[in-house]
């Protein structure tokens, strides 16, 4: 196995107006690694995912995915120039995202939500896409809900559809942006179960922004504590949760676990 | 002439009015989508054309547009050596469509712009092109939002067709005028005219409601 990182942030800067969200962030993820990102709100955790999903651009530095720059491409003279929409389109194929608010398409049935992009973007036939969609619904435990519309499902069920929809595009990297934050407490478990099941898949690289500390501890190979646009501390879940070396990490964990 | 004899010519006129309404509403809707989406385009030229069209046709009177197309355009055409004489039906449908399309464009633009940005982000994350996102995600969600306004515009359009009687098109109002000139029975004939327009508006409203229910059926599905 090569240890070449599948995701690499190299001194990445991101600003929203006067506010600097990422301050020369360095961050790498290896292929197949499951990484949880924790930290206070406003620390730039979600921004990292949104930059990877190409929903936000960057103001400095280089982001690489699969060894290739994401927000840049080689110009005619070999120098890096800002990425074209065509380059982003190609790069996005490696990534999938699960949103905090699910972002399902309300006018499509559950199955259609899952099959539309494979048909339109990957060029699968309706039949192939449906078969694959049904398998995925089976995986997330919603095989009997295929014909319903999103608003007819509970939040937990909707988020499981969101996961199936992202998987249907066969990404090698799956991004979870606080996938359980919008859910009623009793519905969190069913979503975490599905994510936990995916984490057992060897090849899938997972990046999880979450406030579910116990879950992060169970599924992650590595946990990163973000603070003020940088990684303040990172390590195995064991190290970070039981014996953090930074005072700031300790404070945060104390506050959130109380 | 007994008042029951008015029915024949009035119904003939009503049929013309129905056709005018149907054609101009359908063409108007196509123009509304074209200009409404055009106004949201990232292409400057398309946006400029759409805005110019919308502002010109909202900012001038329908009656003047109609007269211009029917009386002024042929003369302008003659000056440059092209035959631009339009049959009254074509001038009527054209003026009505262009007018309703300009109003409808604002409805289309507003409804599309109101679709939540989360939906665009989901589309992008699934690697849809902007055009695919517009077609498969944004527009289908925006259409139910447009329907109440489209219903109003369609009824407005039905009533506006009365203006075409002024370019001698044999619509409902034109026929009524003919009968009135002949019989001088203003009260009866205008009352019948009111009731007929009102009846047609009721039917049109019901049709638009049915269409609205159809395009929003995903919203009302029950578990």
Image: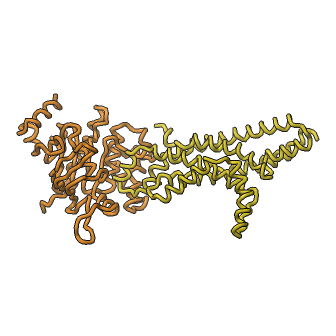
Chain colours: A orange, B yellow
Seen from the viewer's position, the closer of residues A36 and A165 is: A36
Q: Quadrant of residue A210?
A: top left
Can I make out residue A188 in this image? yes
Q: Is residue A148 visible?
A: no
> Which of B163/A142 is in front?
B163
Relative to A147, A11 lies left or right: left
- Taking the view exactly as shown, the residue that stands out farthest to the right is B1
Furthest toward the top, the residue is A258
Residue at 40% x, 58% y is B129
**The residue positioned farthest toward the front in the image shown:** B79
Side (left or right) of B57 relative to A84:
right
Foreground of the two, A218 or A15: A15
Q: Position of residue A77 (x, y in %)?
A: 24, 71
The x, y position of residue B113, in whole percent, is 46, 46
Image-based side of A36 in relation to B15, left or right? left
- Placement of the N terminus of chain B among the 4 image quadrants: top right
* Residue A7 image point, x, y percent: 19, 56
Question: Could you tell whether A163 is left or right of B32 in the image?
Answer: left
Residue at screen point 39% across, 49% down: B120
Quarter holding residue B149:
top right
List x then y, in percent, for residue A46: 25, 44
Residue in the picture at 22% in, 67% down? A79
């Amino acid at each position: 196995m090569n240890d070449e990182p599948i995701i690499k942030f190299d001194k990445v800067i991101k600003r929203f107006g006067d506010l600097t969200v990422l301050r020369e962030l360095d961050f790498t993820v290896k292929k197949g690694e499951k990484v949880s990102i924790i930290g206070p709100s406003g620390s730039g955790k979600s921004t990292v995912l949104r930059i990877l999903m190409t929903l936000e651009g960057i103001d400095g530095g280089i982001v690489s995915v699969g060894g290739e720059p994401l927000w840049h491409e080689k110009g005619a003279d070999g120098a890096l120039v800002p990425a074209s929409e065509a380059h982003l389109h190609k790069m996005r194929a490696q990534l999938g995202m699960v949103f905090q608010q699910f972002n399902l398409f309300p006018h499509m049935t559950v199955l259609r939500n899952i099959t539309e992009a494979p048909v339109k973007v990957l060029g699968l036939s309706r039949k192939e896409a449906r078969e694959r969609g049904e398998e995925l619904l089976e995986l997330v435990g919603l095989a009997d809900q295929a014909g319903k519309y999103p608003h007819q499902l509970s939040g937990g069920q909707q988020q499981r559809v969101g996961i199936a929809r992202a998987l249907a595009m066969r990404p090698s990297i799956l991004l979870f942006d606080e996938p359980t934050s919008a859910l009623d407490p009793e519905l969190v478990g069913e979503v975490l179960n599905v994510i936990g099941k995916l984490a057992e898949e060897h090849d899938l690289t997972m990046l999880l922004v979450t406030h579910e500390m116990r879950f992060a501890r169970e599924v992650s190979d590595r946990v990163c504590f973000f603070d003020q646009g940088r990684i303040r501390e990172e390590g195995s879940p064991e190290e970070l949760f039981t014996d953090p070396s930074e005072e700031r990490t300790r404070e945060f964990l104390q506050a959130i676990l109380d | 002439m007994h008042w029951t004899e008015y029915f024949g010519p009035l119904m003939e006129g009503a049929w013309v009015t129905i056709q005018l309404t149907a054609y101009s509403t359908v063409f108007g809707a196509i123009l509304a989508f074209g200009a409404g989406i055009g106004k949201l385009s990232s292409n400057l030229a398309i946006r400029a054309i759409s805005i110019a069209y919308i502002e010109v046709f909202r900012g001038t009177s329908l009656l003047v547009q109609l007269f211009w197309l029917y009386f002024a355009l042929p003369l302008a055409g003659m000056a440059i050596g092209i035959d631009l004489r339009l049959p009254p039906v074509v001038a009527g449908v054209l003026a009505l469509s262009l007018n309703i399309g300009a109003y409808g464009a604002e409805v289309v633009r507003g409804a599309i712009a109101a679709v939540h940005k989360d939906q665009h982000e989901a589309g992008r994350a699934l690697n849809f092109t902007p055009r695919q996102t517009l077609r498969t995600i944004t527009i289908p969600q925006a259409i139910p939002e447009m329907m109440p306004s489209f219903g109003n515009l369609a009824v407005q359009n039905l009533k506006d067709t009365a203006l075409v009687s002024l370019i001698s098109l044999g619509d409902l109002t034109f026929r009524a005028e003919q009968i009135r000139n002949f019989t001088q029975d203003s009260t009866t004939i205008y009352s019948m005219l009111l009731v007929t327009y009102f009846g047609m508006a009721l039917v049109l409203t019901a049709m638009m409601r049915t269409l609205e229910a159809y395009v929003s059926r995903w919203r009302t599905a029950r578990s």
